[in-house]
Amino acid sequence: MSLSAEQSTAFLAHGGFTPEASSSLLVSAVFAVLLIWGVWALRTAYVGWAEHKLTQRQLLGVAVRFAAMYVALTYFLLS
């Protein structure tokens, strides 16, 4: 659903930025949070694997889940 010209003008007048800029900011924030969480999850899993608290299969499971989440969000947010 797209905004009409009047709605877009009102959005720009009251917010000071375009709806497209707002959308880009939101999508960027989602990806930034996802990547920060992914680095934390992978690092934590690696430390657990290095200390022999996780198996290699569990470490791979964390990596695959993160990759699947990244691909799914990329598909839904950037298509």
Image: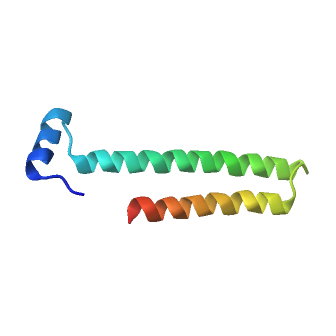
Q: Nearer the viewer, residue 50 or 60?
A: 60
Quarter residue 55 falls in: bottom right
Is 57 situated left or right of 18 in this image? right
Which residue is the extreme one toward the left? 6
Quarter containing the C terminus? bottom left
Is 32 situated left or right of 39 in this image? left
The residue shown at (75%, 46%) is 44
The residue shown at (12%, 52%) is 4
Q: How is the image coloured?
A: rainbow
Q: Nearer the viewer, residue 14 or 28?
A: 14
The residue shown at (44%, 62%) is 76
Q: How many marks?
A: 0
* Residue 64 at x, y percent in the picture: 68, 63
Which residue is the extreme one toward the top? 14
The residue shown at (41%, 49%) is 28
* Residue 60 at x, y percent in the picture: 76, 62
* Residue 54 at x, y percent in the picture: 86, 53
Quarter containing the N terminus? bottom left
Is 75 situated left or right of 66 in this image? left
Which residue is the extreme one toward the right? 52
* Residue 29 at x, y percent in the picture: 44, 45
